[in-house]
Amino acid sequence: MLAFDIDDTRIEEIAREFAATPRQVDMAGNRAAKRTAGTLRKISSKGLQTELGLKNAKAIRRRIREYRVGRGRKSLKLWYGANDLPISAFKGRPQRVAGGVKFGDTMVHGAFLATISGRRGVFRRTGPNAYPVIEATLPVADRIMIYLEDEVFVDIDTIYFKHFLAEIRARTILGVGDERRN
């Protein structure tokens, strides 16, 4: 798990600059954290699609979850499912070769090409009988973690403060959350 600390002194400076109340700062911090999580989800799903060579971002988007773990601006948690992905999620065409199926640089021994329940894919038998069969998968956990650490999470402070600045500006101009205006 990666943890990030937001610089409280910079938040206080921005709050003083806009003459924001503590309630406005809390409201803007909550909203900025939520928007930052959404931005990170968007950046990571699109980037991982390209990085992993997936047909579309659907397989990655369904593996990203956002959780509230408390209150305030340090309350969001992004979870990325890094289980193996089925071969059918990747770009490319599997080829049947002696001993299995070849997909790109990967050889899946004992696999076969088939259409099962209307889905064409690469399958493997789980036992000595004809059924049950499972779809063959490729490991992606290491590539996902390396990409997230190197490309996505390096700009989290910039993204957060961009959203925080927009939120605090809007809340102070419009008077949202200002007890003094009531």
Image: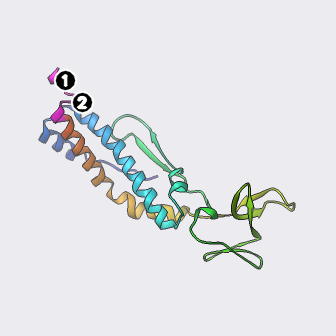
Front in this rendered view, residue 138 or 49: 49
Residue at point 45% right, 64% down? Answer: 147
Q: Earlier in the sequence, mark 1 or mark 2?
A: 2
In this rendering, position of residue 50 left or right of residue 37: right
In terms of image quadrants, where is residue 127?
bottom right
The answer to whether mark 1 and mark 2 are in CB contact below 8 A is yes
Q: Residue at x 59, y 57 (%)?
A: 83
Residue 4 place in picture, x, y as percent: 36, 50
Q: State which quarter of the image contains the C terminus.
A: top left
At a point 22% along the width and 44% down the height, the residue shown is 166
Looking at the image, is 58 positioned above or below residue 171? below
Judge left or right: residue 63 versus residue 20.
right
State the residue lying farthest toward the top.
182
| Number of the label disc, if any, that sits on residue 179 | 1
Secondary structure type for disc 1: helix
Q: Position of residue 33 (x, y in %)?
A: 34, 43
- Quadrant of the rendered image containing residue 158: bottom left
Residue 28, located in which quarter of the rendered image? top left
Q: Which residue is mark 2?
A: 23
| Distance CA(mark 1)–CA(mark 2) | 8 Å
Number of on-image labels: 2
Identify the residue at horizontal 32%, vertical 38% (top origin). Answer: 30
The tag on residue 61 is: none
Give the residues in magenta. 172-182
Residue 137 picture location, percent across and down: 65, 63
**For residue 167, above or below residue 118:** above
- For the residue carrying disc 1, how many other residues have a C-alpha within 10 Å: few (<14), some (14-19), or many (20+)? few
**Amino acid carrying mark 1 in the image:** Glu
Q: Amino acid at mark 2?
A: Arg
